[in-house]
Structures are given as structure tokens and as C-alpha cells.
Amino acid sequence: MLVHGFSKNSKDMKPLQRNLELLGYQCFLPDLPITYQEFEFAAFVLDRFLEEIVTFDLRENEKIHLVGHSTGGLVIRDLITKTKNIDKIGRCVLVASPNKGSQLANIAGKVKLYVEIFKTLKSLSYEYIEQIHFRNHPSIEIAAIAGDRSNYLLGNLIDGKNDGRVEVQSVYYADLKDFMIVPYGHKEIHHKVETAKYIDAFLRTGQFLPK
């Protein structure tokens, strides 16, 4: 299941779908409300999609891998925290996800009207993320991929290495099974064949590269 990010829809995950299908995967691309609502609402909607797949399409011993880009990664983490279908989830990969919050969201938060309209962006602030108690599950391995090519104007507003939208240090957190950095920007990282190959390696083996 491929989960898109803030202000996007399933079309943004089409390149990743094509790349993963060439590697043998069947992909499901939900459209989620990740613009005008806090990301927890998108997690609730995603859980409904998951329930439908588990009920009608999943064979007894199959599991669903989850891959999220940007805010989509936070949606996945919130889903894992709350879903009753935890035993049906396989491995997860978070691509350029602001797991500790976003500097740009904090900057946008100074314009109150803006974040009151775009509530998803409001929910990406450091303060908001700190109040979310994501719970990892021992049966689910999660890895993350960060980009460090800051080739967008907004990247100049971010301290430290970043992909033009999200800082590298925010993508990483201690409970990850694996973590790597690739030389891509935020808008392109999930469209690259190389990224799909790393995702494939982790979903199959539990690591991005052979140890």
C-alpha cells in the first residue's frame, strides 16, 4: 500500500507503483485527506481501506507492506499505533517523512490563518508531533529513507541537511530497523528507480543493503 503525502493524491505515487510492479509487487494507492485535516484523520481513513483489503482481498497468510512518502509516513505510524489489523501488516518504509516534525511547518505556523485552513501542515509542527505517542509494534520492522539534495528554494530556510522540504535529522528516529540517505530532493525521491530498489530490498530482507 503506497501512501501519498501532504496536498497530494494517489497520482503522486504512480511512478513508485510502476517501479515496484516491475519488481513483482501488487500495489494499492488510496486517496487520503492529507490537506485540510490533521494526519490522524487520514490514518483513520487508511485503516478503513486496510480493513476492506483484509476482509475481501487478503489470503490467510498474506501481509500488506506499507510505504509512505512525506506525511504519508506519519499516517502509517499512526495507523500502526491504532489499528486492530496489526497482524496483517508486514514491513514498512517511510520515505522523506518528518518523523520529528518539520521546520517549514513551524515557520508556516506563524501565519495562524494558513495553518488553520491547512490543518495537515499544522499537525507537522515539532510541538504537535511531540504530543503524538506513536507506538512501534515488535512484529513490524520499519525503515526510513531521507534525501539530502536541497534543490528547492524553501530548503534555504531549513537548518542542516535537507531535501528541500524535510531535514534529514527529522527523518531518522532510534527505533528504525534501517536508515539510509540518498541524493534526491523531496519531490523526486519516491519517483526514482533506485529508491524503489532499496524499498524492495528492505521489504524482502529487512535491510536496504547487504551487511
Image (cartoon, rainbow, N blue to C red):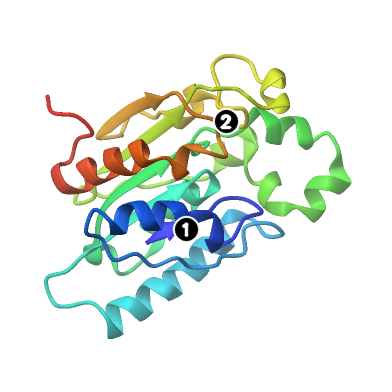
Labelled disc at residue 166: 2
Tell me which amino acid carries mark 1.
Answer: Lys
Tell me which amino acid carries mark 2.
Answer: Val
Q: Give the residue at the far top of this rendering.
A: 160
| Residue 9 visible to an observer of this rendering | yes
Q: Give the residue at x 51% y 70%.
A: 45
Give the label, 2 or 1, closer to the camera: 1
Q: Under tag 1, what secondary structure?
A: helix
Using the rendered view, name the quadrant where residue 210 is placed: top left
Q: Give the residue at x 47% y 37%.
A: 189
Along the horizontal axis of the image, is 177 left or right of 161?
A: left
Residue 71, horizontal then vertical, whole percent? 54, 47
Q: Nearer the viewer, residue 190 or 114?
A: 190
Residue receiving disc 1: 14
Along the horizontal axis of the image, is 155 left or right of 160?
A: right
Q: Nearer the N terminus, badge 2 or badge 1?
A: 1
If the image is split into quadrants, where does the N terminus sit? bottom left
Q: Nearer the viewer, residue 67 or 84?
A: 67
Q: Under tag 2, what secondary structure?
A: loop
Using the rendered view, name the quadrant where residue 122 is placed: top right
